Image: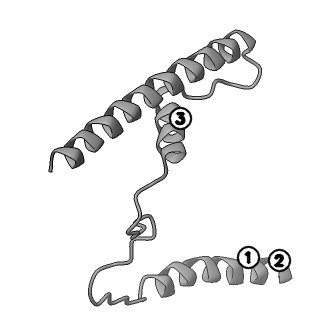
Amino acid sequence: MKKFALAVATAATLVAVPATAQSAFVMIIGEAPRPAVVETDTPPSRETLIEGAVARACPAPFIRDLKRRNLHAECEAQARAEAEAVLAAREGSAATTVAMR
């Protein structure tokens, strides 16, 4: 009899919990907060730009994949050199624009 009463109580709890969870009401006034957005006035540093470009260009391989680890190191070196060249060209054109004004 005790087992039957325990089973009935457990079943009643399982049925009652979702019913109470559905009755919650949430009201959001204004825009929802966006934690991923960071408002800064300063532009990212050169090193941050390069690291971001390398991370997007060369995803890290699985730790046990030794062949791809070597290729990943080469990819990082090549991507870093290309990113530095692009940033140097961009900074050079920006300096030329400022000098012309």
Give whichever of 88, 33 is nearer the camera: 88
What crowding class fits label 3: few (fewer than 14 Cα within 10 Å), some (14-19), or many (20 or more)?
Answer: some
Q: Amino acid at mark 3?
A: Ala
What crowding class fits label 2: few (fewer than 14 Cα within 10 Å), some (14-19), or many (20 or more)?
Answer: few
Marks 3 and 1, the one that precedes in the sequence: 1
The disc label shown at residue 55, or none:
3
Would you identify the image quadrant in which residue 43 lies? Answer: bottom left
Residue drawn at 41 percent across, 88 percent down = 23
Mark 3–mark 1 contact, CB under 8 Å? no
Q: Dot 1 corresponds to which residue?
A: 7
Query: What is the total number of numbered labels drawn onto the structure image?
Result: 3
Q: Dot 2 corresponds to which residue?
A: 3
Marks 3 and 2, the one that precedes in the sequence: 2
Mark 1–mark 2 contact, CB under 8 Å? yes
Q: Amino acid at mark 1?
A: Ala
How far from the left and from the top, in percent, is residue 92?
32, 35
Q: Amino acid at mark 2?
A: Lys
